């Protein structure tokens, strides 16, 4: 971390509103609360700015990575605004959170230090719910955690209309955005709910998602009023990042062998399905490693037992679905391995970020293969099964999820520094070479695919930007299928242009071109993904265009060779010194013009 918060362009407020702030106290008092209630000596990077802004009663957006300590940024102002730390009380605070287990944990932690906190969600028994409602009515609640569904209930709104509310904190605020990785339609109700609080409460939104789209959505969908915006650096210099493309079996072997080599360390392995967590936990146990599976299908008691044993180091490795991790705070997790590719960089970074919270080195390795890409793509196409929403919304949601996935694929395939790629995604510039990731370590080879990439661009153009990746690959490969012939694609000028390359190789090139922005995937008629030119298509039509993709070195790491490392992936042994393509070919003026025209 650079130790600084960056107020976002143009919007940051430098001027607090002294009269109101001084009523409840300022940052010095906040520091005393930090010590007295939580026992911490100092604020972490970014916390002070955010707390001051809320105490100054400004709407606030705080973008801070996982583990940065966002909860304290609303809890401390909540205590001060309720007057429980001395001074006048303005009202209670409402925290909107999508995570039931987190609510319960935070509320018990607050109660343990003497704070009057409660929660309302669907897991409460009716009598407990009635008790919480009565406590609110009698102004006995300082901090109320609340599920977003609750906000639309009439009884709740009536109660809130009659209760002074000083602050509404929206945790995981990216859930309000269709461009986020975890869109929850209920979050759209928040804006309307805010009208219920009179006088209007200060609104503070928190997220670890830093893309510009999401940030803008948070501000507009919550109806924030000229908010002060803060963002802390997302860099985690103590973490090493790696990616590796391996077939399914080889992934398991790699993980077992890694865990064996690090038997005295705690680690988390993330899998995409419950079944995989069980299978891999078994494989690890058979190798003599103290491992356990963790997923939402296990009984509550089992899950808390596993979690406790992990915190106490009785279990060394947790093999989990993404149900594990929220609210778990184990500082000395030394590695986080991904058995599959997550569906977005946000998710990946959040999960990987659970390594090395104590500041000591942590290793984060992402294993992936084409099966993962298909699996995640299918998941997106199943968006149809998700609740009721207008078609236009569903289409937009799908498009944004494809974009998120493409960025993830781009990270897996990039030949550049992985840290630079991650930080670039979060809108930060990083040193081009961090020297602390698998790409900087040089654990890969790259293949020059300039010629192939140009042919792909040509083919996409030949076929009128109307067909999907599979068809483009088949046409380039010169497939003699009925589907190709029926549509006359075998007469396209680019038909068979990459005849000597294998089909999987051509698909890999296309996938990486999408990830790098030369191509983009659009939904045709809201249903069918087609390849079109991406924002960087012009670059590919330039004479000096040069393009490489990553190929895993055949001999790195444990586990066998991936498809990418066997012969026959690119073509019959073409890979090597002879694969350099003269860029002269690219100045083909016709192609140049045609690519231009279509932009
Ligand atoms: P986030 O929501 O940003 O992911 P949390 O609010 O869950 O992070 O905080 C992560 C951990 O950091 C918690 O255990 C919290 O108690 C701890 N923490 C937060 N602020 C401080 C601080 N100023 N000093 C020490 N520990 C802190
Ligand atoms: Mg949090």
Image: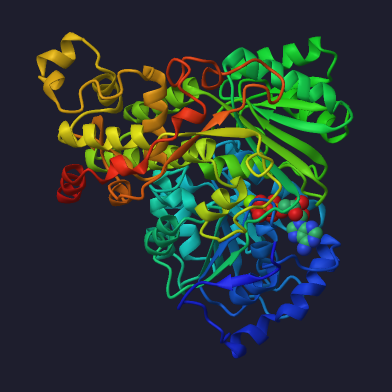
Residue 467: image quadrant is top left
Between residue 284 and residue 54, name the one nearer to us: 284
Between residue 569 and residue 474, name the one nearer to us: 569
In this picture, is 46 found above or below 97? below
In this rendering, would 56 be left or right of 511?
right
Displayed-image quarter of ligand 1? bottom right
Residue 223 seen: yes
In this picture, is 24 found above or below 263? below
Residue 553 location, x and y as percent? 62, 27
Residue 81 seen: no
- Identify the residue at horizontal 58%, vertical 33% (top origin): 445
Residue 265 location, x and y as percent? 85, 32
- Identify the residue at horizontal 56%, vertical 87% (top origin): 15
In this rendering, would 428 be left or right of 390?
right
In this picture, is 54 found above or below 154? below
Between residue 146 and residue 245, name the one nearer to us: 245
Residue 129: image quadrant is top right
In this rendering, would 527 be left or right of 297?
left
Residue 81 location, x and y as percent? 65, 73
Query: Which quarter of the rendering shows the N terminus?
Result: bottom right
Residue 513 location, x and y as percent? 38, 38
Between residue 352 and residue 229, name the one nearer to us: 352
Residue 334: image quadrant is top right
In this picture, is 54 found above or below 540? below
Query: How was this image coloured?
Result: rainbow
């Amino acid at each position: 971390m650079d130790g600084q918060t960056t107020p976002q362009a143009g919007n940051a407020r430098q001027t607090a509103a002294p009269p109101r702030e001084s009523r409840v106290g300022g940052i010095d008092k906040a520091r005393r609360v930090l010590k007295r209630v939580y026992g911490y000596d100092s604020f972490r990077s970014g916390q002070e700015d955010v707390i001051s802004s809320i105490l100054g009663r400004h709407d606030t957006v705080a973008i801070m990575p996982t583990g940065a300590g966002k909860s304290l940024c609303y809890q401390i102002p909540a205590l001060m605004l309720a007057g429980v730390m001395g001074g006048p009380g303005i009202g209670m605070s409402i925290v909107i959170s999508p995570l039931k287990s987190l609510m319960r944990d935070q509320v018990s932690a607050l109660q343990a230090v003497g704070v009057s906190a409660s929660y309302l969600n669907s897991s409460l028994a009716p009598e407990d719910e009635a008790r919480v409602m009565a406590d609110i009515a009698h102004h006995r609640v300082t901090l109320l955690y609340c599920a977003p569904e609750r906000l639309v209930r009439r009884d709740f709104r009536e109660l809130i209309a009659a209760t002074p509310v000083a602050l509404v904190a929206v945790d995981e605020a990216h859930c309000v955005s269709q461009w986020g990785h975890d869109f929850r339609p209920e979050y759209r109700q928040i804006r309307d709910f805010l009208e219920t609080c009179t006088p209007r409460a200060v609104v503070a939104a928190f997220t670890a998602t830093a893309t510009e789209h999401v940030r803008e959505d948070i501000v507009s969908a919550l109806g924030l009023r000229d908010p002060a915006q803060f963002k802390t650096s997302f860099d985690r210099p103590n973490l090493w990042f790696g990616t590796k493309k391996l077939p399914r079996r080889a992934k398991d072997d790699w993980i077992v062998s890694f865990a064996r080599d690090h038997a005295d360390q705690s680690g988390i392995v993330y899998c995409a399905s419950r079944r995989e967590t069980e299978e891999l936990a078994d494989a690890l146990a058979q190798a003599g490693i103290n491992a356990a599976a963790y997923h939402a299908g296990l009984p509550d008691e089992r899950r808390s037992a596993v979690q406790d044993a992990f915190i106490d180091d009785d279990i060394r490795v947790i093999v989990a679905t993404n149900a594990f991790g929220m609210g778990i705070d184990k500082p000395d997790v030394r590695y986080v391995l991904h058995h599959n590719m997550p569906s977005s960089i946000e998710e990946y970074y959040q999960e990987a970020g659970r390594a090395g919270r104590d500041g000591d080195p942590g290793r984060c390795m992402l294993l992936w293969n084409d099966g993962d890409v298909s699996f995640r793509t299918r998941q997106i196409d199943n968006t149809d099964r998700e609740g009721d929403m207008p078609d236009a919304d569903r289409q937009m949601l799908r498009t944004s999820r494809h974009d998120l996935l493409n960025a993830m694929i781009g990270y897996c395939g990039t030949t550049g520094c992985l840290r630079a790629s991650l930080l670039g995604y979060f809108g930060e510039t990083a040193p081009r070479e961090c020297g602390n990731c698998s790409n900087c370590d040089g654990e890969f080879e790259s293949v020059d695919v300039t010629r192939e990439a140009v042919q792909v661009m040509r083919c996409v153009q030949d076929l009128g930007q109307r067909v999907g990746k599979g068809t483009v690959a088949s046409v380039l490969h010169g497939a003699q299928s009925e589907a190709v012939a029926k549509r006359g694609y075998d007469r396209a000028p680019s038909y068979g242009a990459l005849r000597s390359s294998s089909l999987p190789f051509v698909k890999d090139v296309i996938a990486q071109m999408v990830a790098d922005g030369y191509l983009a995937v659009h939904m045709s008629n809201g249903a069918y993904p087609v390849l079109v030119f991406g924002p960087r298509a012009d670059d590919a039509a330039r004479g000096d265009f040069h393009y490489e993709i990553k190929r895993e070195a055949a001999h790195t790491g444990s586990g066998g060779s991936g498809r990418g490392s066997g012969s026959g992936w690119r073509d019959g042994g073409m890979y090597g010194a002879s694969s350099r393509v003269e860029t002269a070919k690219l100045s083909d003026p016709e192609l140049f013009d045609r690519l231009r025209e279509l932009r």
